[in-house]
Image (cartoon, rainbow, N blue to C red):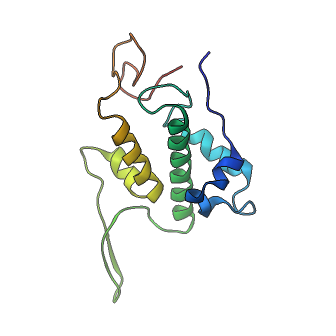
Amino acid sequence: MADIILFNYAEFVANPQFKAFSNPAEYPEVTIQAYWNSAINYISDVRNCGNVQGEQRRYAIDLMTAHLMYLSTVIAAGQVPGIMQNAQIDKVSVGLTPPPLKNEFDWWLMISPYGQMLLALLQANTAGGDYYGGSAPRLGFNQAGMFPWCR
């Protein structure tokens, strides 16, 4: 059985980088746990899987959790999440950068400060790359090239 990283509410809200989500009245443990459960659909919760391992992996999952919470907050406020390209005050005009066709996942991460930190972490730690495809080590992505399978 693989060493699984478990959600730690006290550690998450104590991290100064996630101060925006530390108010228990606004973000109770059950709410953050639900976002954590969504985050592990993007980043495996197996501690020693791929290039980002151990506590770095926990931090990556925390960043993905905060990214999902940030996007939810923006959407709940009636705003459209995106990277602002330009703005105009008189006669209100806002231009958003369209998602690039080459890599929409990077664009999606870039629309929150937490996603930007996560993208930098992933890029810094995957320079050599994981094993993609095939079936031998099962690190990286599954045979279809989709999501990480480390269990």
Q: Residue at x 29, y 58 (%)?
A: 98
Q: Residue at x 25, y 47 (%)?
A: 101
Left or right of residue 95: residue 18: right
Q: Position of residue 57 (x, y in %)?
A: 51, 36
**Number of numbered markers:** 0
Q: Nearer the viewer, residue 84 or 19?
A: 19
Left or right of residue 34: residue 139: left
Q: Nearer the viewer, residue 5 or 75?
A: 5
49 relative to 97, above or below: above
75 relative to 62, above or below: below
Left or right of residue 14: residue 143: left
Residue found farthest to the left = 102
Q: Position of residue 76 (x, y in %)?
A: 57, 64
Q: Position of residue 115 (x, y in %)?
A: 44, 52
98 relative to 46, above or below: below
96 relative to 60, above or below: below
Q: Residue at x 59, y 59 (%)?
A: 16
Q: Residue at x 48, y 37 (%)?
A: 42
Residue found farthest to the bottom = 90
Q: Quadrant of the C terminus?
A: top right
Q: Quadrant of the N terminus?
A: top right
Q: Position of residue 94 (x, y in %)?
A: 34, 75
Residue found farthest to the top = 136
Q: Quadrant of residue 33?
A: top right
